[in-house]
Image: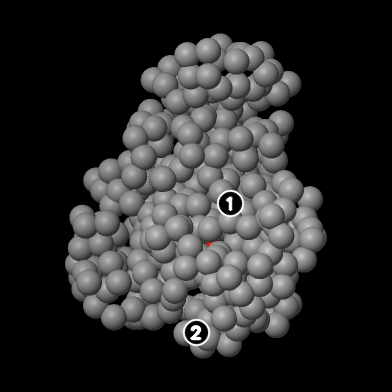
Amino acid sequence: MLVNRGIIDEQKNQIIYSHKDMKYLPVSNDSIKQAAEILLAGGLVAFPTETVYGLGADAYNAEALAKIFEVKERPRFDPLIVHIASIETLEDVADMSLVEKETREKLFALAENLWPGPLSIVLPKNKKIPGIATAGLATAAIRFPDHEAAQQLIKLSTGAIAAPSANRFGSLSPTRAEHVRDTLGDKIDLVLDGGPTRVGLESTVLDITGGTLKILRHGGTTKEAIENLIGRIQDEFVSEDDCNGGMLSPGQLKSHYAPKTPLCVMTQEIITNLIYEKDSAFLFFSAESREKWEKALKPPKSAVFRVLSESGNLIEAASRLFETLHELDKCSLLQIFVEYAPQIGLGEAINDRLRRASS
Ligand code: TXA
Ligand code: MG
């Protein structure tokens, strides 16, 4: 059933929207069923996961997959993540005959301990998955999300949903259904609203296909959690030095996950000595940094600043990062100054996103 734009759902005291043809529905058995029907018919559905909202299509339907690239304005060379809803269905999307015994053991150690969860594992793809899903690669990144509505949706459709984050290519990932509605809303068939996402950062992407194990993207599963299960792994992108040198020179890095407002990421030492300027925002990692800054620089009452986690908790900081950047991005500011998180645990993923978001 379609609801009218701007109607208030009195029970939940929230506004439910519906664009011209797009449906925007809270998660329920009924809306998930509708969503599955749309996917089976080749449509696009935005749905919540524990990390960020995904823009889903049937992973076996090449035409539906092509629509994802169009809507996201995503280059065709960037492969999608294939979502499944049980370890038993892994063989439907991966070609396990190409996985050697040693790698297989590592894979199952990971899957049994970290799935469902924010970990995407790159494996040889099953031939049934069209090449467009994996941008022509012989491998696919596969993930079993830790979110009940997502799992139900996957099970009710074909058992495999290919989904990138439901944002325009290069911009901030959506942690709320409203973020999807405001950017892609009129281009997709249904947005399922499951409230704010729990983890708030995308999954970690781990390649176990080569001889060596590599993290291709830091995310919601820490390197430590993976190494505890399968031993030492390589880091594809992050060099530890990146975080020690203060401000990074702009333009050096591949831009991604970026707000529209120019963002500059820096160490605690630099940010806590930065004089407040009008039309800028300060985003501190913890209360400790904010207090240092307030004490030293005595910013005016009108200063715009936020703290990712008062107590300096990395899990809380990760869950609030995109959320806070979305919020600050709406404030018509000239710049956002952000402090690095400590480079441990989820801090690696937070800092990776900040580096790529910096202009
Ligand atoms: O948490 C997440 O991972 C979210 C939710 C929706 O599941 N999805 C997500 O998808 O972040 P996306 O498309 O925004 O990011 C997928 C990342 C990209 O960096 C892509 O290059 C990488 O995974 N990737 C996908 N397939 C790959 C493959 N076969 N080999 C190497 N990297 C791959
Ligand atoms: Mg993305």
Identified by mark 1, the residue type is: Thr
Residue at image position (57%, 30%) is 191
Q: Quadrant of the C terminus?
A: bottom right
Residue at image position (64%, 78%) is 273
Judging by the rendered image, the residue that carries numbered circle 1 is 324
Left-right relation of 116 to 199: left
Identified by mark 2, the residue type is: Ser
Residue at image position (77%, 66%) is 277
Residue 9 visible in the snapshot: yes
Query: What is the x, y in percent for residue 6?
Result: 67, 18
Q: Quadrant of the N terminus?
A: top right
Badge 1 density bin: few <14, some 14–19, many ≥20, Cα 10 Å: some
* Count of residue discs: 2
Residue 77 visible in the snapshot: no
Q: Is residue 135 above or below residue 17?
A: below
Q: Nearer the viewer, residue 227 or 349?
A: 349
How is this picture coloured? one colour
Residue at image position (47%, 85%) is 240
The circle drawn on residue 231 is none
The circle drawn on residue 239 is 2
- Give the number of the mark in front: 2 or 1: 1
**Disc on the earlier residue, 2 or 1:** 2
Q: Nearer the viewer, residue 324 or 255?
A: 324
Query: What is the x, y in percent for residue 221?
Result: 36, 61
Query: What is the x, y in percent for residue 282?
Result: 64, 63
Badge 2 density bin: few <14, some 14–19, many ≥20, Cα 10 Å: few
Q: CA distance from mark 2 to mark 1?
A: 26 Å
Occupied quadrant, residue 344: bottom left
Q: Nearer the viewer, residue 305 or 31?
A: 305
Q: Secondary structure at mark 1?
A: helix
